[in-house]
Every structure is written in C-alpha cells, then in structure tokens.
Amino acid sequence: MKHPAMEKKTVLLMGATGLVGGHILNRLLENETYDRVIALTRSAITGAEAFSKLDTRIVDFGRPDQWLDQVAADQTICALGTTIKKAGSREAFRQVDYAYPLMIARAALNAGCRHFLLVSAMGADADSPVFYNRVKGDLEAAILGLGFTCVSIFRPSLLLGDRREFRPGEAVGQVLGRWLAFAIPKRYRPVHARTVAAAVVGIAAADASGNRVLASDAIAEWGAD
C-alpha cells in the first residue's frame, strides 16, 4: 500500500502572476510532490501551455460564481494582494486582501482542502492602528478560525525582487535594506520573493499537521538553497 505522504497532490494557487506568486508557481511546477497545479488568475500566465500539470483559469474574483466550484485541491496557497494606491481606495484594498482570500479559503475548505498557506505581511495584527496591518491581521484570524487541519502563515518583511509595476518607496527600501542588512535584526531584514516562495513550497510539500506563523528570519531559514 502506498504511503499517504508519497501520494501526488493537487494544489490550488491564487496570485500566480504576482511577485511572490510567480516564484511559487515556478517552484510548484518543479516539485514532484504535485501532479496538478490549478492557478486561478486575473490575467494570463505566459508559457503556461508548456506545462502539462498546470491548469490555468482566468477569472474575475469579484464574480465568485465563476470560480467557487473550481477550488477543489489538497492544498491551497494564497498569494493574492495589492496596494491601496493600486486598488484605488481602502474599501477596494480590503476586498482584494481580505474578502477574496477569505471567500477562497471557505470554498477550499468545503471542497476538501486540508492545508491552507497564506502569504501575509510583517506587522499583521487585527488590533493594529495601521489599516494595512489590521486588514492582514483580520484575514489571518479569520482563516485560523475556519477549521483547516493545517494553516501556514508567512509574514515576510520588505520583499526584494523585480515587480511588474514600479513602487518608488519600496525601491528605496530595497536599496537601504541591502546596505543596512547587517545592522537589522534577522526577523526584520528584507527577504527575496524567491526565498519566500521556497519556504512556502517547502512547508507545503512537508505538509505537517498544525498551525504555524513564520516571520522573515524563519522564512529565510526554510527558503535557503
């Protein structure tokens, strides 16, 4: 009889066209733990047709009737996210960074998902006076309360890597972060998106029971090549 841990898994990925999500997708396609990767995206993935185990579906997350019945998977990885500036308002930001991920989590759980992995942010706190951090904290608390067998939450610090869109403040932070990394405590140091992706896929493949929250220092350890 085949050991359950050796069975191939199906994983659902949200946010595959983003900075971290793109690296996660690459890692999942290379990882032999998975024989099917379902990616629900808002835009097309270049070169998707080259991977037989990649099932891409372009959806409008604002219309759940398009995708709520397409989330059945053993594991779900959520790397959805935006900025208030890009979203256009606080309400629109909360819709993308809270409402959609929570809707996805509930649907995935109902479809049999046992392990939910969430890319959150450093400072996430439901009681934070900072709106961004409060939204992230609200989402973490809501997902932890749903009843998954396992929830893995990743709270990276400033993300390094090349984004599609230019963010001036983040670009300055990346430069300063590289120069001052030796003087910054490990849990607050900038971390590259590919390192976050390596940690996410590593923990997903290990698939240990229980809940965990990883700050940047733990992410860096898990994601070290």
Image (spheres, rainbow, N blue to C red):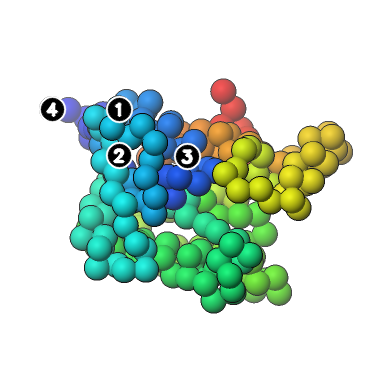
Question: Residue at position x 44%, y 70% from top?
Answer: 99
Q: Position of residue 35 (x, y in %)?
A: 25, 32
Quadrant hosting residue 164: top right
63 versus 26 height, above or below: below
Alpha carbon separation for disc pair 1 and 2: 13 Å
Pointer 1 residue: 50
Q: Dot 4: within a 10 Å radius of its alpha carbon, few (fewer than 14), some, or many (20 or more) residues?
A: few
Q: Amino acid at mark 1?
A: Ala
Q: Which residue is under mark 2?
A: 37
Say whether disc 2 or disc 4 marks the residue closer to the N-terminus: 4
User: Looking at the rendering, in which quadrant would you find the N terminus?
Assistant: top left
Q: Secondary structure at mark 4?
A: loop
Q: Secondary structure at mark 2?
A: strand
Front one among 130 and 147: 130
Find out whether the residues at labels 3 and 2 contact each other: C-beta distance under 8 Å: no
> Residue 2 is drawn in which quadrant?
top left
In the rendering, which numbered label is found on residue 22? 3
Q: Residues within 10 Å of mark 3 (few under 14, many from 20)?
A: some
